[in-house]
Amino acid sequence: MTFLELSGIRKVFPGGTVAVEQFDLTAERGEFVSFLGPSGCGKTTTLRMIAGFEQPTAGTIHIDGRDVTTMPPNKRHVGMVFQSYALFPNMTVADNIAFGLKIRGEDKGRIRERIGELLTLIHLEDRGDRYPYQLSGGQQQRVALARALAIEPTVLLLDEPLSALDAKIRVALRREIREIQRSLGITTVYVTHDQEEALELSDRIVVMSDGRMEQVGTPFQVYNQPATPFVASFVGTLNAVEATVLDPVAGRLSIGGLEIHSTKGVTDPAGAQVMVALRPEMISLDATAVEGTNRLPATVADIAFLGSVVRISTIVGDGARVDVDTFNNPNLALPPRGTQVTLGFPPEAVLVLAQGSVAQEADVLAAAEAML
Amino acid sequence: MSTFVTPRAVDTAIAPPKASRRRRPGGSWWAWLVFIIGATYFIVPLVATLEFSLRPNPPTFAYENVLTDRRFYASLIYSFVIGLITIVLSLALIVPTAYWVRLRLPRLRPIVEFVTLLPFVLPPIVLAYGMIRFYSRQPLVLTGTEVGSDFLLVAAYVVLSLPYMYRAVDNGLAAMDVRVLTEAAQSMGAGWFRILWSVIFPNLRTAALSGAFLTLAIVVGEFTIASALARDAFGPYLSLLGKDKIYEPAAVALISFGLTWLAMISLALVARGSRTRVQMGMPR
């Protein structure tokens, strides 16, 4: 049954900037939905409209059957966790958690009980009398979560809650968040630009770009069946190589004169220049000939040890670079640089995208430098 | 040509090499010299005033006269009470205004700042006689009664304290993320009064206190407006004392100076004793 519904949501800021365009989403009770996208894609603006801190220019928002589109934020009964924690510096941990309960007029006994429950939930039983500045970043964020949960909100909203924390704490805390959310069954909307977070935590992911929804789906769907070139390139690592269409009906393409097959469907006509996208983990260096496997000769250019994954960079055809990911294994025999290898990948791993639809490495680095 | 889509981590935080710290030759004696000159400039008049106030025989004569004069206590208490009322009204006016400007009307900040600077431009005597002229006739006659005149005095002092109180409060608000704290409180059901009372005001304690003591210092020492409104405040008392006493004004000046320092020390103790850190997301 639909619990959260956004229909035709559009947001235009003064000055004409369109932050969100035609956003439609329904979420079931207890579902964990992530908004994933780069900075400026409209994900936080959409979240703030659900919370009531921004008014949509068009469209409606319903929570549990109530139209909350124009309702002030302090009446919506949603809990929000902010990127900067937003703990009240003048209050202890216990007072922060109790804040919403006191506003609701709960009696002191009930408040004390609830504080105890939540401190246990976030594993800070002995920190109730501390002030925010006496806590670490991870502890502060857990208190922020407890404070949002104290009022038993109808919807829990999290705006990049882990982005200010270091990697190890982020991983540990996001799992805690997911466990708490599952145990309480609260409908949750989570904003992040970290695809790993989104993939691990979500029941469904909304991938956004330039204010538009690119795709809505489960993590499996978004990763393995990207609906648009943006989703294919934003979620996960992707190799993209130029290719020529030989036979669109049969799914035959040519990379540097060598023929490969795709089962995903080719819509461009014969002779068209396209981009073939391949996930690094779908490629192997196993030279064993398997019926139907695509094979491309390549030269090993570099090997990068990334911990659990070893990334082997190869050069194919006329200088195209293709990365191959393999799980780390102490007994792994890695080919030295310059070795001639054969890349093998199944036809179903081949994505065919329009040429120019995937960002070039130089464009990504130039964009990063422009931000400095 | 291949494309490689995963953004490579760019090492952006290349810290510049630490500049070597060379001690300036003779740097420390120079600093001491400047300190001694400044301290001398400050302390010598105080010492001279103290010496002058101790000249009579016995040396405590002037102090005894002042401390047994009921007008000293009456005028000091009156000025303190007026000062406290001024502080409360100033905070009640300025904190919500500065908060709302920061939160919703940032474009109005330059205008508001200009208005708060007007008291520097307007001489107090002009303010005083303008008030007397306006409020001594219909429709609103306030100068004919004690309470009315007291009210006018407080109102004038609220205006005089505007530059100091506004700046202190505005600096305090700048040190906290007003928008995020407000939104956090709203998400838990708080209305505007609750937000101001439970979140904003408590986190402005140090800033409000610094503004309050500046206001108190202005009120206690102010003469022109209090005299024009014929109020028995400390400023007119001090002026009256100087007309027919020799040593007592020096004694009163030192006593009031001591009281001001006591207030400043109290502020420092209160601020140091505060267990809050206003900066957001500041873990240990």
Image (cartoon, grey):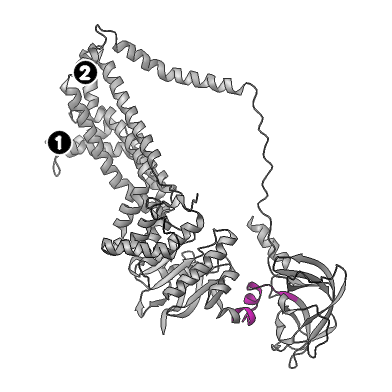
Name the side, left or right, on which A204 lies relative to A339.
left
Q: Name the residue rendered at 52%, 21% in the picture.
A: B34
- Say above or below: B83 vs A254: above
Q: Does the rendering let one see residue A54? A: yes
Instruction: Kindly identify which residue carries mark 1.
Output: B143
Q: Does the rendering let one see residue A11? A: no
Residue B222 is situated, as x and y percent measured from the top left of the image, at 27, 29
Whether the residues at callouts 1 and 2 have beta carbons within 8 Å, the answer is no
Q: Nearer the viewer, residue B225 or B127?
A: B225
Image quadrant in which you'd find residue B257: top left
- Magenta segment: does it hold B227? no
Position of the N terminus of chain A by quadrant: bottom left
Image quadrant in which you'd find residue A49: bottom left
- What secondary structure is found at the residue carrying circle 2? helix
Tag 2: amino acid: Val
Instruction: Point out which mark residue B66 bears.
Output: 2
Q: Name the residue rendered at 19%, 39% in the picture.
A: B151
Residue B20 is situated, as x and y percent measured from the top left of the image, at 68, 35
- What secondary structure is found at the residue carrying circle 1? loop
Callout count: 2
On the same chain: label 1 and label 2? yes
Tag 1: amino acid: Thr
Q: Name the residue rendered at 26%, 42% in the picture.
A: B88
Q: Nearer the viewer, residue A134 or A60?
A: A134
Q: Which residues are magenta?
A: A221-240
